Image (spheres, grey):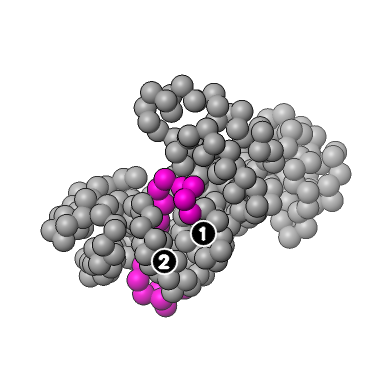
Amino acid sequence: MIFFKGCPLRCDWCSNPESQSFDYSLMYDRKLCKNFEDCVKYDTGYLTSVDNGIIIDWDSVSHPERLANVCLSKAITVSGEEKSLSEIMKEVEKDSLFFQQSGGGVTFSGGEPLAQGTELEKLLNELNAQNIDVAIETTLHVSWAQIQRCLGKTGTFLVDLKHTDSDKFKKYTGGNSDLVLTNLKKLVARNENITIRVPIIPEFNHTFQEMKEIIDLTSSLKTIREIHFLPFHNLGSAKYEMLGMKYKYNVKQHLDPAEMQEYVAYAESVGLTAKIGG
């Protein structure tokens, strides 16, 4: 799996907030801080030493990548690294024997892979040249041109379909659901291989009526026959403090798979193959 940094959406429940920015992200875990002060001595201008650790002026953070290997206790880390096409391919080729034996391939995840620049298409071309199958996890919240360049080079699009209500989608993700649905229908019209993945989020879409609307829409798209329900968890909430961000989705509920059985049953009743988990 290849994880790309950067996403156009800001879902309130995002479990990987370090993947939202297209730039490097500074992370500080106060629990690991030993007050060695190596980071402060590095003179970034946005770190201040205090008795129980450091204070970060998050609004002033710049060039966090310079601190990637400064902290001996790993209280400060940097999310993100630049990799050339050849470096990525060298990592992929380590698993080439596995791909040959299993018939598997590479999954692009994120962030939003389709929001990447021209190097994404070059990587797809390299993987195709070596007959390595590619799946792309995507929100489809990008321009059609960003999707179109991947057509014919992607084995499966794993599409997040979060909601059908435009107002609710906008409120909780900051995005435009019409863009997602328009792109999805264009993919279907081109007979692309698509699996729908629905994050089940309490207070957002975790009702039978809302899920029925998502399932009915999926069922109406005749080339799509598979849907996955992904249970909400808040395991990534601690990362927000480490990034100097506020976690907006203070829902304590972890979903039991049993709570989604009625969604699976309904999806199967309208002719879809359904499962819980991705």
- Eyeballing the image, is 156 above or below 200? above
Residue furthest to the bottom = 167
Reading the chain from its start, which is encountered first: label 1 or label 2? 1
Name the amino acid type tagged 1. Ile
The quadrant the C terminus occupies is top left
Q: Are marks 1 and 2 in contact (CB under 8 Å)?
A: yes
Residue 106 appears in the rendering: yes
- Eyeballing the image, is 184 above or below 79? below
Q: Which mark is residue 147?
A: 1
Query: Which quadrant of the view contains residue 219?
Result: bottom left
Name the amino acid type tagged 2. Lys
Name the residue located 75 percent from the left edge and 43 percent from the top edge.
65
- Identify the residue under disc 2: 186
In the image, is residue 139 part of the stretch drawn in magenta?
A: no
Choose between 39 and 165: the one closer to the eye.
165
Mark 2 crowdedness (10 Å alpha carbons): few <14, some 14-19, many ≥20: some
Q: CA distance from mark 1 to mark 2?
A: 10 Å
Query: Which quadrant of the view contains residue 80?
Result: top right
SS type, badge 1: helix
Residue 106 image position (x, y, % from top left): 47, 37
Name the residue located 49 percent from the left edge and 25 percent from the top edge.
96
In the image, is residue 161 part of the stretch drawn in magenta?
A: yes
Residue 64 image position (x, y, % from top left): 75, 46
Residue 36 image position (x, y, % from top left): 76, 32
- Eyeballing the image, is 127 above or below 114? above
Q: Is residue 208 left or right of residue 74?
A: left
Q: Which residues are magenta?
A: 151-171
SS type, badge 2: helix
Residue 13 image position (x, y, % from top left): 45, 58
Name the residue located 61 percent from the left edge and 53 percent from the top edge.
116
Residue 240 appears in the rendering: no
